[in-house]
Image: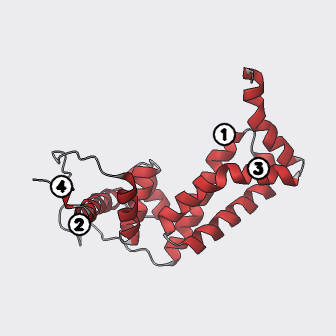
Amino acid sequence: MDTKQANTGPDLLLERCRNKEPKAYKELYELYAKAMFSISMRIVNNRDEAEDILQESFLKAFKDMSRFPNRAAFGSWIKRVVINHSLDVVRKQKLNFLSLDDADHIENDESAEEISYDAAMVSECIQELPQGYRVIITLFLIEEYSHKEIAEMLKISESTSKSQYNRAKKKLISLVQQKNPVYEQH
């Protein structure tokens, strides 16, 4: 495939969607659905909710295909829609965070021994975290949002985001250690 074709191929798919070709919608959906479902699942931790979020997000995108000049713009936008919609679902479930006033002071443990964990086990443990912790870990570690961005999305303070992340990280390490004592730090 030549470079010109490689650069226009993905954007041609969007053009076909703008022309309302059903097969193009299906191709675009299949291109992003698995990744977007994973993002939503990590946040809401409920298969049915994540599937609903995925469907609603794509319906929203397909209604306004003209706003996407290229596939990169579409990819960024659909990811943000999925995250925001997932957070809306979580908010409706009364997501609770501890304020710094209610929390013990948590230090960043920069000297903690770095351990290589099995990704599947860590992913499983993330799903077992309390909802607030899971959301913060997902947004910060996996989706790579800053604490400032997380604070804005969740309508909490930046310091609350940081403290919740530190608590979540400690809880996650504890869960991993419980599942596999080989990872216990000495």
Looking at marks 2 and 4 on the same chain, the residue that comes earlier in the sequence is marked by 4
The amino acid type found where label 3 is placed reads Glu
Q: Which residue is located at x 59 percent, y 74 percent?
A: 48
The amino acid type found where label 2 is placed reads Gln
The amino acid type found where label 1 is placed reads Ala
In the structure shown, which secondary structural element does the residue marked by tag 3 occupy? helix
Report the residue marked by disc 2. 178
In this view of the protein, can residue 183 be seen by the observer? Answer: yes
In the structure shown, which secondary structural element does the residue marked by tag 2 occupy? helix
Looking at marks 3 and 1 on the same chain, the residue that comes earlier in the sequence is marked by 3
**How far apart in space, not on screen, are marks 4 and 1 (Cα)?**
38 Å
Residue 1 is situated, as x and y percent measured from the top left of the image, at 74, 24
In this view of the protein, can residue 148 be seen by the observer? Answer: no
Q: Looking at the image, do the residues carrying marks 3 and 2 touch, with CB atoms under 8 Å apart?
A: no
Mark nearest the camera among 2 and 1 is: 2
Q: Looking at the image, do the residues carrying marks 2 and 1 touch, with CB atoms under 8 Å apart?
A: no
How many other residues sit within 10 Å of disc 2, few (<14), some (14-19) or many (≥20)? few
Judged left or right of residue 25, residue 53 is left
Report the residue marked by disc 4. 107
Report the residue marked by disc 3. 27
